[in-house]
Image (cartoon, rainbow, N blue to C red):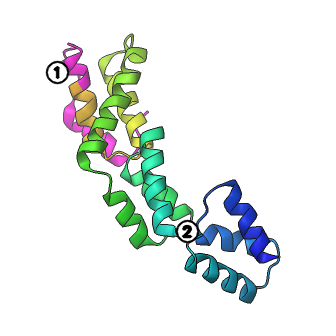
C-alpha cells in the first residue's frame, strides 16, 4: 500500500522524501513500512532530493524569476536537506540572478511610469524583495533601470533612507 501511494504521488509530480513521508503518515501507513519503502525508492533513484532541488532551482528561477533566498525557502519548506539546498542554490550564478532581476524590472518599469520616482523605486524594489533578491541588488537594479530610462533620480530621494528601508523589510 505504501509503495502504491508513493508511486501515485510521484506520477503526479516530483516529490521530496519528506513530502512522501508526510503523505504516508497522513494516510496512516506505519512508520516502519514507510521507512522501508522510502529507502527502497531512494536506492533505485525514484527519490533524489538533490536532483529535485537542482531541478526546482532551475525551473523556479527561469519560470518565476525567483532569487536565491526565495528558492532556498521553498526547498526548505519541502523538507530538502540544507546541504542539498545550498548545492542547488549555488548553481545559480550571481550573473544569472542579476540578469533575471534586470529583466523583471524592465517588464514592470512601464507600468510605474506615471508614479513619482520614490514610489517607483519602492514598488520595483519591493517586487524584487518578494521574489527573494537581496536589498542591495534590488536597489541597484532599480536605480540603473530608472537611470537608463532617463529619469533624474537624485531629486527628492534620500538614498541612505531608502536603502535602510529596503534592508529592514519589504518596501510598500
The answer to whether the residue labelled 2 contacts the one labelled 1, judged by CB atoms less than 8 Å apart, is no
On screen, residue 119 versus residue 24, left or right, reads left
* Label 2 or label 1, whichever comes before in sequence order: 2
| Position of residue 142 measured from the top left corner of the image (x, y, whole percent) | 28, 29
- Secondary element under disc 1, as helix, strand or loop, is loop
As displayed, is residue 61 above or below residue 34? above
Quadrant for residue 4, please give it.
bottom right
Which residue does the image show at 47% across and 72% down from the upper left?
81
Q: CA distance from mark 2 to mark 1?
A: 45 Å
Which residue does the image show at 55% across and 72% down from the upper left?
45
Residue 162 shows in the view: no
Q: Which residue is mark 2?
A: 79
Q: Which residue is mark 1?
A: 154
Q: How many marks?
A: 2
| Position of residue 15 measured from the top left corner of the image (x, y, whole percent) | 61, 62
Question: Is residue 152 found inside the magenta-colored segment of the image?
Answer: yes
Of residues 101 and 91, the one drawn nearer to the viewer in this rendering = 91
Magenta part of the chain:
145-172
On screen, residue 46 versus residue 130, left or right, reads right
Of residues 90 and 11, the one drawn nearer to the viewer in this rendering = 11
**Which label number is shown at residue 162?**
none
| Position of residue 43 measured from the top left corner of the image (x, y, whole percent) | 56, 80
Residue 61 shows in the view: yes
Question: Is residue 165 found inside the magenta-colored segment of the image?
Answer: yes
As displayed, is residue 115 above or below residue 169? above
- Secondary element under disc 2, as helix, strand or loop, is loop
Which residue does the image show at 61% across and 83% down from the upper left?
39
Which residue does the image show at 42% across and 69% down from the upper left?
84
Which residue is farthest bottom? 32
Amino acid at each position: 500500500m505504501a509503495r502504491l501511494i508513493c508511486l501515485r504521488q510521484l506520477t503526479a509530480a516530483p516529490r521530496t522524501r519528506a513530502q512522501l513521508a508526510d503523505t504516508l503518515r497522513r494516510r496512516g501507513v506505519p512508520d516502519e513500512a514507510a521507512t522501508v519503502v522510502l529507502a527502497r525508492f531512494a536506492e533505485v533513484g525514484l527519490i533524489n532530493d538533490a536532483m529535485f532541488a537542482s531541478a526546482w532551482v532551475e525551473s523556479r528561477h527561469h519560470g518565476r524569476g525567483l532569487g536565491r533566498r526565495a528558492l532556498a525557502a521553498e526547498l526548505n519548506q519541502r523538507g530538502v536537506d540544507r546541504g542539498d539546498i545550498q548545492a542547488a542554490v549555488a548553481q545559480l550564478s550571481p550573473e544569472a540572478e542579476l540578469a533575471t532581476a534586470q529583466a523583471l524590472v524592465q517588464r514592470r518599469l512601464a507600468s510605474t511610469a506615471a508614479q513619482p520616482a520614490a514610489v517607483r523605486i519602492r514598488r520595483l524594489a519591493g517586487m524584487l524583495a518578494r521574489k527573494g533578491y537581496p536589498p542591495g541588488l534590488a536597489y541597484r537594479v532599480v536605480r540603473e533601470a530608472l537611470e537608463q530610462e532617463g529619469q533624474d533620480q537624485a531629486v527628492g530621494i534620500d538614498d541612505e533612507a531608502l536603502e535602510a528601508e529596503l534592508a529592514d523589510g519589504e518596501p510598500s
